[in-house]
Image (spheres, helix red, strand yellow):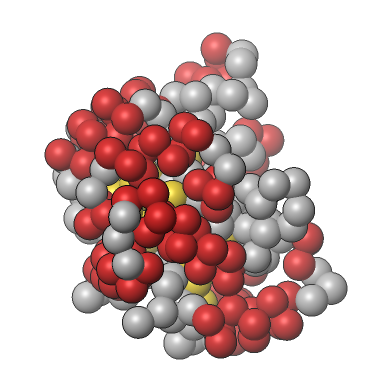
Amino acid sequence: MKPVDAHCHIDFDQFKDDREEVIERSKEELEFIVNAGSCVENNEQALKLQEKYPDFVVANLGLHPTYTEKFDQLEEVKEQIRDNDPVAVGEIGLDHHHITDEAVRDRQREVFREMLALAEDLEKPVVVHSRDAEREAVEIISEYDLPGVMLHCFNGSVELATDAVEKGFLIGVTTQVLYSNRVQNIVRDIDVDNLLLETDSPFLYRGDRNEPLNVAESAKKIAEIKELNEEEVIESTTGNARKLFRNG
Ligand SMILES: [Zn+2]
């Protein structure tokens, strides 16, 4: 079985010169990749990639919590989701790291709730960013009835990860696991059956540009931390990604 990159942004400009090569390279190593959308324009790019690589790229459509200058696109993004029927709604969420103004945070909460309500209505899983707002994000998500939740790039406490997993949420482990003690501790304490591999490309690779096939390195690292075979890590995480993003 091959690993999956459950969350990346291959539509971003960092890939404008070699996007095809990056995807072709990933195809050799991975089962599929999930490109999260961030706003109307990026959602369109994600859909184009999915159209071009139907067996390999899965598009999620959302409105990213740090794209505050795009929050006026909310109605348009909702329409895009209704029209294009993506497998999951994301990237959505809260970010209290970049956004410190309380009025803007309130607007972020509203946008997040609107997207969660839409996902509930359409019975779609959600992919949630929760930087420095992990506890609040988990509490808000819990108010909605959703078929699946990915806490993408989870950097909260081990306790919160444990609570989230009890609710049936999946924990996205990025390539931060290669160098972050916090993420390594989460991985140590959470059962592999609750994890997803992701890169969040082009970010989170020790300052270099990240790309999807680096999830293979994470699988190796997680196996080492949890004293499992790499194969077991890939089976669990790919199984979770299939359930969330490929209906089985
Ligand atoms: Zn992301």
Residue 239 in the image: above or below residue 169: below
Residue 195 showing in the rendered view: yes
Residue 8 in the image: above or below residue 32: above
Rendered residue at 21%/41% (across/down): 165
Rendered residue at 39%/35% (across/down): 185
Given residues 150 and 2, the one toward you in this image is: 2
> Residue 59 vs residue 157: left or right?
right
Q: Which part of the image, by quadrant, shows the N terminus? A: bottom left
Image quarter of residue 243: bottom left
Q: Where in the figure is residue 9, as x and y percent of width and height? A: 61, 60
Image quarter of residue 189: top left
> Residue 21 vs residue 113: left or right?
right
Residue 75 showing in the rendered view: no
Rendered residue at 54%/63% (across/down): 217
> Residue 137 vs residue 41: left or right?
left
Residue 65 in the image: above or below residue 55: above
